Image: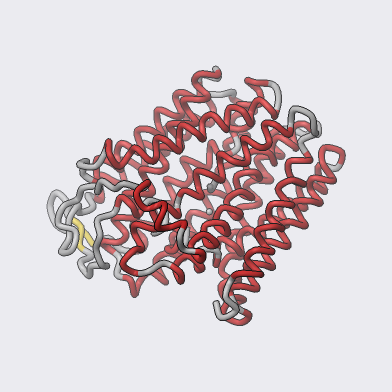
Amino acid sequence: MPVPAIWCLSEMVFPCWLATATMPTDTAVSSVSSPRRAGAYTFALLFAVESFVRALNSTVVSLQAYDILGASQKVSVLSTSVSIVVLTTTLMLPYVLGNLRRRWAYTLGVILLMLASLALASHMLAGQAAGMLMRNTGAAMLNITLSLYIMEHIQRSELARAEPLRLSLSTFSWMTGPAFGVWLYVNYGPWGPQVVALTAACILLVIFWYLRLSDGGRTLPRGNLQKFNVLSNIRRFVAQPRLRLAWLIAFGRSCFWTTFFIYGPLLIVESGLDKTTGGLMISASQAVLLSAWFSGRLARRHGVRKVIAGAFALAAVMSAAAGIAGTGGPYLAMACLLGGSVAASALDGVGGIPFLRAVHPHERQRMTAVYRTYIDFSELVPSFTFAIMLLWLPIGMVFVMLSIALAAVGLVAWRFLPRSL
């Protein structure tokens, strides 16, 4: 899922690995000859290239799994199995990589993306599973280290300018990558998108090492990832109702994107349309991410509570309509799913605010360690549920079930979010 890049999200993803620190004012980076300044464009460039590497395979992964396994239900089983392993791996990574320098952690993340492309190019079930696992794990490591670099080099007062720029540039990667990847897969076979992904990953690695980002600053003298026990904070997190609500909102938002990315293209293929159409739909959905900016303005005028509840309601209606249209009306289903992506983009813009408002400052990093598990569970729970459903029901029912879940989360948000939020 684009997976979706403003600061409140990037700071939420894996801050459990970040050293506890305030935002430094030092923005210098070291190079072989002389220091270079690392600013907003530096991290926007890195994130845009990384996003392009992942976007190339975002739709190819599910379509190729469908070609190998021959049924949407079996794709769900595979996704569920991989999600369980990824969840376990993510929780264990801090212990395995706790003393690794950040530059080497970032490098290892890129190498995992490369290995994932090689595994996916095999077009075999074992390679498919290994590729999906390494792709998700590599993306996790890149998110961790890039977030730490941003904390060190970008002043908090500059984040309002830097993060929209990073989101905007990555949007172009997600607009072009899915459709281009599927086109390469259809016309050149399994190696087509993987050769381009490998090339882009190599370019990313060259850019990163050319920049020679500093591993240390005034408040982060050691550039190591920090060991962190996620499980020890679960009880404290669950004891706070507002944090539970914030987690549920983020989980619901992420479930839409996960379902859309995996089952949207499968619905298109099962309706008889070509794979390229599914890739174009995913790319088009990412273009509307630019509308996330307007959700912030709406929230300032009407309140975060109304925007979140309204966005969930719209996403639920559009998902239900897409499911009812199903394989018999694929173009109507695509239009409805794109309408739902507009609502999900609004949630991307303001959906993280309940957590940021609810968490105590002294607990922020420890509680975020638990909060970010919504990402893993949003990949695991839908895949597991739909794997059972698709044994008896058509693929359109996936989106009907999704709409029920989205409506439930929207009602809970409307009922329990503070009116003053």
**Where residue 398 sits: x, y (%)?**
73, 41
Query: Taking 362 as reference, is 93 above or below it?
Result: above
Query: Taking 353 as reference, is 58 above or below it?
Result: above
Residue drawn at the location 55% of the way across and 43% of the way down: 177
Q: Residue furthest left?
A: 33
**Where residue 89 sits: x, y (%)?**
39, 35
Quadrant of res 23: bottom left
Question: Which one is nearer the viewer's eye here, 161 or 193?
Answer: 161
Residue drawn at the location 60% of the way across and 37% of the way down: 59
Q: Residue furthest right?
A: 328
Quadrant of res 113: top left
Question: Which one is nearer the viewer's eye here, 371 or 104?
Answer: 371
Residue drawn at the location 54% of the way across and 36% of the way down: 57
Q: Which image quarter is the N terminus in?
A: top right
Residue drawn at the location 24% of the way across and 42% of the way down: 98
Quadrant of res 155: bottom left
Q: Which image quarter is the C terminus in?
A: bottom right
**Where residue 274 sits: x, y (%)?**
74, 32
**Where residue 53 sits: x, y (%)?**
46, 40
Query: Taking 114 as reference, is 374 above or below it?
Result: below
* Side of 31 relative to 302 (left or right): left
Rendering colour mode: secondary structure
* Side of 242 relative to 109 (left or right): right
Q: In the rendered picture of this protein, how many numbered marks are placed on residues? A: 0
Question: Which one is nearer the viewer's eye here, 300 or 398?
Answer: 398
